[in-house]
Image (tube, rainbow, N blue to C red):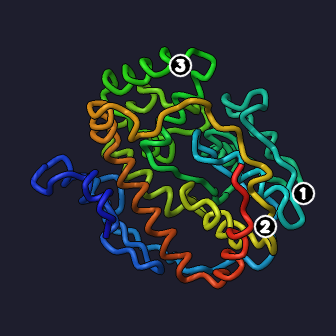
């Protein structure tokens, strides 16, 4: 089911630890049905959800975007806000009382796109049953982007050596499985080992997979940005999509890519992000299958042809 890179990330089949992760990976993924076999006593053994493209025909008045750091979220939110009839952007992470559970900003009426780091869980405080939108980026690149953005005001060598220490000294570097699993709006947006270690990784992985299936309208992929943008637009009923390159968020300056790093650091990242990689590859394949089934291929192609590098 997985592409070569993802299979390599899982390691040899003889390794019990890797086998435990694979046992919780969707056993069937054909673009229409996603069957999750989640082997944990607190999670249903099988969870079957229809993933057919049942688009919403009327534009949704309100959209809830769970923005995880380093995934292209500001660009996505800015583009959606200016697409179709447009949305009023409300970044809830900037609101007073946000982390204490003050959900009053959600009382806004009209066409609103609520977004923010760790938005997940806040609407439920108001008794709102919502479906979220989110984006994933390959875990290796997201980790690098997160670190170098946080420390962008330090000199280049300090940032680089600080990243090496983070990789070598952290017990694990799993992020998505916790920020889509056991963590919510009360937690910090960036990776913090203490917060991401309150629940065992295996349990967090199972919970994150269940949440992404049951509580999310669209799980996009940054490396497939245009496809993700079009899918979100269709699911919320937009009839046109604004040019995303006009709203691109500034990139971290002078940061390495994964393959620029020394071998020991690359191996450390791969070893400590195993669950995140499985989660990412699963939902990337799901997105690929859904795009193949879509009825907007011609429009998507034209949109991508006009995209401008910035």
Vertical relation: 152 (above or below) 230: above
Residue at position x 41%, y 40% in the image: 258
Residue 144, horizontal then vertical, whole percent: 48, 35
The quarter of the rendered structure image containing the N terminus is bottom left
Residue, disc 2? 241
Q: Secondary structure at mark 1?
A: loop
Residue 98, horizontal then vertical, whole percent: 72, 32
The image quadrant of residue 92 is: top right
- Check disc 1: other Cα within 10 Å, few if <14, some if 14-19, many if 20+: few
- Check disc 3: other Cα within 10 Å, few if <14, some if 14-19, many if 20+: some
Asked whether disc 2 touches disc 3, contact meaning CB atoms under 8 Å apart, the reply is: no
Q: CA distance from mark 1 to mark 3?
A: 45 Å
Residue 299, horizontal then vertical, whole percent: 72, 78
Q: Which mark is residue 156?
A: 3
Circle nearer the viewer, 1 or 3 = 3
Circle nearer the viewer, 2 or 3 = 3
- Lateral position of residue 162 relative to residue 241, left or right: left
The image quadrant of residue 167 is: top left
């Amino acid at each position: 089911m997985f592409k070569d890179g993802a299979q390599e990330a899982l390691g040899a089949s003889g390794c019990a630890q890797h086998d435990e992760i694979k046992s919780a990976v969707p056993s069937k993924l054909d673009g229409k049905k996603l069957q999750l076999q989640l082997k944990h006593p607190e999670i249903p053994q099988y969870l079957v959800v229809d993933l057919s493209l049942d688009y919403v025909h009327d534009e949704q008045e309100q959209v809830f975007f769970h923005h995880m750091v380093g995934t292209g979220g500001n660009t996505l939110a800015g583009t959606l806000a200016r697409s179709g009839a447009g949305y009023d952007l409300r970044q809830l992470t900037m609101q007073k009382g946000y982390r204490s559970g003050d959900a009053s900003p959600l009382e806004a009426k009209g066409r609103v796109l609520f977004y923010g780091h760790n938005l997940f869980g806040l609407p439920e405080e108001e008794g709102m049953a919502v479906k979220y939108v989110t984006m994933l980026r390959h875990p290796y690149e997201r980790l690098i982007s997160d670190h170098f953005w946080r420390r962008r005001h330090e000199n280049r060598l300090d940032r680089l050596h600080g990243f090496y220490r983070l990789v070598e000294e952290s017990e694990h570097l799993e992020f998505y499985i916790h920020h889509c699993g056991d963590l919510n709006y009360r937690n910090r947006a960036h990776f913090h080992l203490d917060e991401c270690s309150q629940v065992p990784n295996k349990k967090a992985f199972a919970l994150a997979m269940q949440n992404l299936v049951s509580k999310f309208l669209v799980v996009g992929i940054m490396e497939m940005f245009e496809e993700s943008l079009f899918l979100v637009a269709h699911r919320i009923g937009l009839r046109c999509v604004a040019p995303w390159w006009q709203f691109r968020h500034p990139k971290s300056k002078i940061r390495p890519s994964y393959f620029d790093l020394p071998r020991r650091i690359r191996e450390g990242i791969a070893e400590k992000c195993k669950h995140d990689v499985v989660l990412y590859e699963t939902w990337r394949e799901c997105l690929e299958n859904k795009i193949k089934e879509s009825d907007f291929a011609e429009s998507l192609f034209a949109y991508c042809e006009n995209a401008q590098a910035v």
